[in-house]
Image: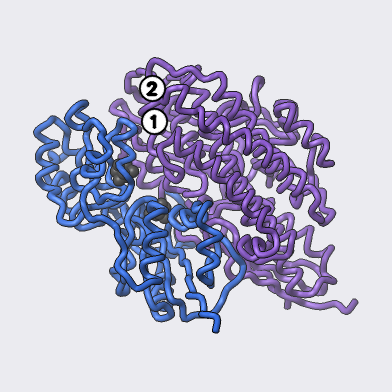
Amino acid sequence: MKKKNRTIKVDYLARVEGEGALHIEIKENQVSDVKLKIFEPPRFFEAFLRGRDFKEAPDITARICGICPVAYQMSAVHAMEKALGIQVQGPLRDLRRLLYCGEWIESHTLHIYMLHAPDFLGYEDAVQMAKDHKDVVERGLQLKKVGNEIVSLVGGREIHPVNVKVGGFYKVLAKTEFDHLKERLKWARDAALETVKWSSRFDFPAFDQDYEYVSLSHPDEYPFNEGRIISNKGLDIEAQEFENNFREDHVEYTNALHSVLIDRGSYFVGPMARFNLNFDQLSPLAKESAKESGIGDHCHNPFQSIVVRSIEVLYACDEALRIIESYEKPDQPSVDFEIQEGVGAACTEAPRGLLYHRYKIDEEGQILDARIIPPTSQNQKTIENDLWQFVPKHLDLPQEKLTWQCEQAIRNYDPCISCATHFLKLDIVRS
Amino acid sequence: MKKKKPKIAVWKFASCDGCQLSLLDCEDELLTVADEIEIANFPEASRRVLKGPYDLSLVEGSITTPHDEERIHQVRRSSKYLITIGACATAGGIQALRNFKDVNEFISIVYANPTYIDTLETSTPISSHVPVDFELRGCPINKMQLVEVISAFLKDRKPVTPPHSTCIECKLKGNVCVMVAQGTMCLGPVTHAGCDAICPSYNRGCYGCFGPKETPNTASLGDWLGEQGTGDPEILRVFRGFNAYAPSFRKESERHEEKKPDH
Ligand code: SF4
Ligand code: SF4
C-alpha cells in the first residue's frame, strides 16, 4: 500500500449528547494526532453553585444534563448528606435505587437503539432504521418508555425530576401506586432479554484492549449510589479520597477537562467497567443472559459495550421489580437533620460511569465551593487512546467508512458532551 | 403527486440537551411524526444532514460564545419558522447566572487556563439576536406541548399553549395549595403554565422552571413572601434560577438584592 497522509475530520459528531468534533491526522500511514474536541460552550456550574443554598444543588446540577439528570441529583444529595453527617436508609434508599434503575433503562435504551445500533446496521439514524426494522425500533422505544415511567413516577417528571431532596424525597408514594409499573416492568424484562440477544449478534470489529476499569463496588449490590471506588489495577478508595488520586488537566483544544489517574494516566468508567468489576453482583437472570450472549463475565472490546449496556438494562428491570415487590411506604418522605458546616464528597454510577461531586457548605447551608467531575471527562483520554490504536489497523478502509468507524469508536462510550463541559468536537485530518 | 414533506431542523446552543431529548422521549408519537416530516438536521439523533432551507427550526440553548452569535443568524436565514424551546433559548437559561457576575471570575473557578476559553460575558436568549416566531417555555419543555407546537406550525395555525399561571393548573388539578397549607414558598402565581403543576403535586413549591407567565405581578408576590417571613436572600435566589434573565424575574431578584444590608 502506498504511504499516504490523510486527515479524518468530523466537524460535528452526531448521535452523542452535546457538541463535539474529531480530528485525526495520519502521516505516512502513522497516526500523528488525535483530538477529540468538545466545543460545547462552558456553562460554569461549579462557579454559580457558590452562594446557593445546599437544598438547591439537586435541582441546579440536574440541569448540567438532560440525559442523566438523576445521576446529578443522586451524586449531589449523597455528597450533601456526607457534609451534613446524615445517612438515608431503608425504603428511601431503595426508592433512590429505583429512580436510578429508571434512568439506566431510559438512558441506556436510548443509546442502544437510537444512537449506537444504527452504526452496526448501517443506518444514519433510528428513524431510517425503522423503515426496515420497525418492530425492533418500537421495542426500543417502549423499553425506553418504561424507564421514563419509573423516573416520572418516583421523580415527578422524566427530565429534571422535581422530587429529589437532600435527606430523601418531597413525597413518597404508596405501594399500590407501583402496581401498574410492575406489569410494565415484566414486559420490559422480556424486551431487555431480547435486546441482549439481538445486540450480541452484531458484527464487532476485534478490538480488545488492556484498560484500567474504575467503578464503585459495594459488598451487597450492583453499584448505583454507594460503595468504594475500585479498579482492576489495585485502586481501592473512598469517595473523599478521589481528588488525591485523580487529576483534571485542562487541554487547549477542548472545553472539557481531561481526568487522569495520577501517575497512571487514562482509565475507563461506565458500563464495561461496572460489569467487569461487579459481575458477581448481577441478578441471576442478567448473569445467565451474559453467558448465553457469548460475553461471559468480562468484556474488553468497547464495540461490544452495546451488549453490556443491554445486560445492565436487564439487570435494572430485575432490580426495579425486586424493589417494587419488597417496598413498604416509609413513615416520612425524608430524614430530619440539622444544618451544619462541612465538606462532603460522593460518587454514584451515572449510566455513563462514575460521577463525582464535592461540596463545602457553611453553618447556614450556603455552598462555598463545588467540584463536579462527570464520566465523559473521565473517559475522554481513553476514547482518544482507542482511536490511536484503532485507526492504524484500519487504514485500508475507504475514507468515508473509516470516518464512520471512528465516530462509532467514540459512540462506544455514549459520551455526553453537555456533561463534559460543564463540553466534544471531532475532526479526523489525513494529510 | 406525492406532497413534499416539511423539513425540520433541530439546533443546539448552550444547554443541557434536555429540551431536544423531549422529542425523542415522545416514544408513542415519534415514528408517526417522523412519517409526516423530514428530519433534516438533528445531530443528537442522526448523522444525516440535509441542506436548508428548512420549514421549521427548533432552537435549544442560549447564546454564550462569539461563534454562536454568528451561527444563530445562519440558522434564522435558512428557516421559514424559528421556534425556541426551553428556558435556555427563551430566557438565557441557568447559565445566565453569569450575567449578574464577572464572567472572568467564573472562568478562573472552573478552568486552570482561562486563556483557552472563548466565551461571552452574558448568556442571552435567542430573541435578543434574531426574530423568533414562537417561544415554548419550560426547563425542560413539556413534550406534549412540543408536539402541539410542531403540528400547529406545520398546519399554519396558532399553537394552543395557555398563558395563565401554574397556580391555575394546580387548582384545576385539585391540589391543596402548598403555600396556604404548609407555608412553603411557591412561584406558582407568577409562573407560566405548561407543566401541569408538578411540584405542588409532589408537595413542594414551584421554583419557576417554566418562567414568568404573561403579565406576572412578581413585585406583589415578592412583597407577600417577605411578609410571610421569607428572607430577601431566599426570595432573590428563587427568582434567580432557571429563568433568572427573564425581565420580570430579573427585576424582582434585583429588588431583593438592593434590600440586602451592606456588608
Ligand atoms: S431549558 Fe432546561 S431542559 Fe431545556 S436545554 Fe435548557 S437547561 Fe436543559
Ligand atoms: S418548578 Fe414550577 S413550573 Fe417547574 S415543574 Fe415545578 S411547578 Fe412546574
Q: Which chain carries label 1?
A: A
Front-most of residues B36 and B84: B36
In what quadrant of the picture does the C terminus of chain B appear?
top left
Q: Quadrant of ligand 2?
A: top left
Give the percent coordinates (x, y) of residue A104.
58, 40
Give the percent coordinates (x, y) of residue A368.
35, 36
In what quadrant of the picture does the N terminus of chain B appear?
bottom right
Which residue is identified by label 1? A165
Which residue is identified by label 2? A333
Looking at this rendering, what residue extends furthest in the right direction?
A: A1
Label 2 packing within 10 angstroms: few (<14), some (14-19), many (20+) = some
- Tell me: B19 left or right of A219: left
Confirm or deny contact between disc 1 and disc 2 (CB under 8 A). Answer: yes
Q: Which amino acid, mark 1?
A: Lys
Q: Mark 2 lies on which chain?
A: A
Give the percent coordinates (x, y) of residue A249.
57, 50
Give the vertical position of B177 relative to A303 (above or below): above
